[in-house]
Amino acid sequence: MTRKPTMTSRVRDYLSQRRALGYKLHREGRQLLNFAHYADQARHRGPLSSALALRWARLPRAVDRAYHARRLNIVRVFARHQAVLEPATQVPPRHVLGPASAARRLICSPLGNFTNYSGAPAHCPAGFDL
């Protein structure tokens, strides 16, 4: 009888393949390994499920929704890859936790200049009325 691969082994294989293609995956790699350890500690066996991905993505609870959405998006990319190898893999739905990035806040001045959320000055978009 062959043992089913752990989520950690699946993630490590995925990261090795992607890095061999030249992707760095520093932050994403750490997050995916964190997800894999979570899945293995929960004794999850079998293909990735949307429910598992959503439970992990919503951790920790005391952060903004965009953080949760980014975590889910990282797992979604991995899930799409896994779905090719394991057709029973569920790819979590897009935007179920909201957008993965916060909307840009623009502060325009009467002179037609604005500052974006990072503090970098630029010009107001054409046709922008104050």
Image: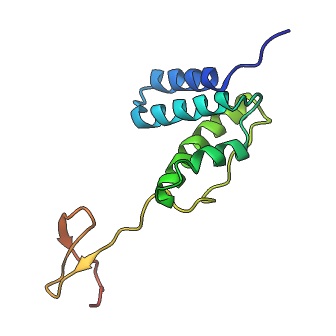
Q: Quadrant of residue 88?
A: top right
Residue furthest left as drawn: 111
Quadrant (top left/top right/bottom left/bottom right) for the N terminus:
top right
Seen at 24% across and 61% down, the residue is 118
Residue 108 point in image, percent of width and height: 23, 80
Seen at 58% across and 47% down, the residue is 57
Residue 53 point in image, percent of width and height: 65, 43
Q: In the visual, does 47 lie left or right of 26? A: right
Query: Which residue is at the front of the view, 55 or 92?
Result: 55
Q: Quadrant of residue 85?
A: top right
Residue furthest top as drawn: 1
Q: In the visual, does 75 lie left or right of 22? A: right
Q: Identify the coloring.
A: rainbow
Residue 123 point in image, percent of width and height: 20, 74
Query: Which residue is at the front of the view, 30 or 58?
Result: 58
Residue furthest bottom as drawn: 130
The image shows a total of numbered marks equal to: 0
Q: In the visual, does 95 lie left or right of 26? A: right
Quadrant (top left/top right/bottom left/bottom right) for the C terminus:
bottom left
Q: Quadrant of residue 105?
A: bottom left
Residue furthest right as drawn: 1
Residue 106 point in image, percent of width and height: 29, 74
Seen at 53% across and 33% down, the residue is 34
Seen at 69% across and 45% down, the residue is 91
The correct choice, above or below, for 123 with respect to 36 in the image is: below
Query: Which residue is at the front of the view, 20 or 68?
Result: 68
The correct choice, above or below, for 113 with respect to 130 in the image is: above
The correct choice, above or below, for 106 with respect to 101 in the image is: below
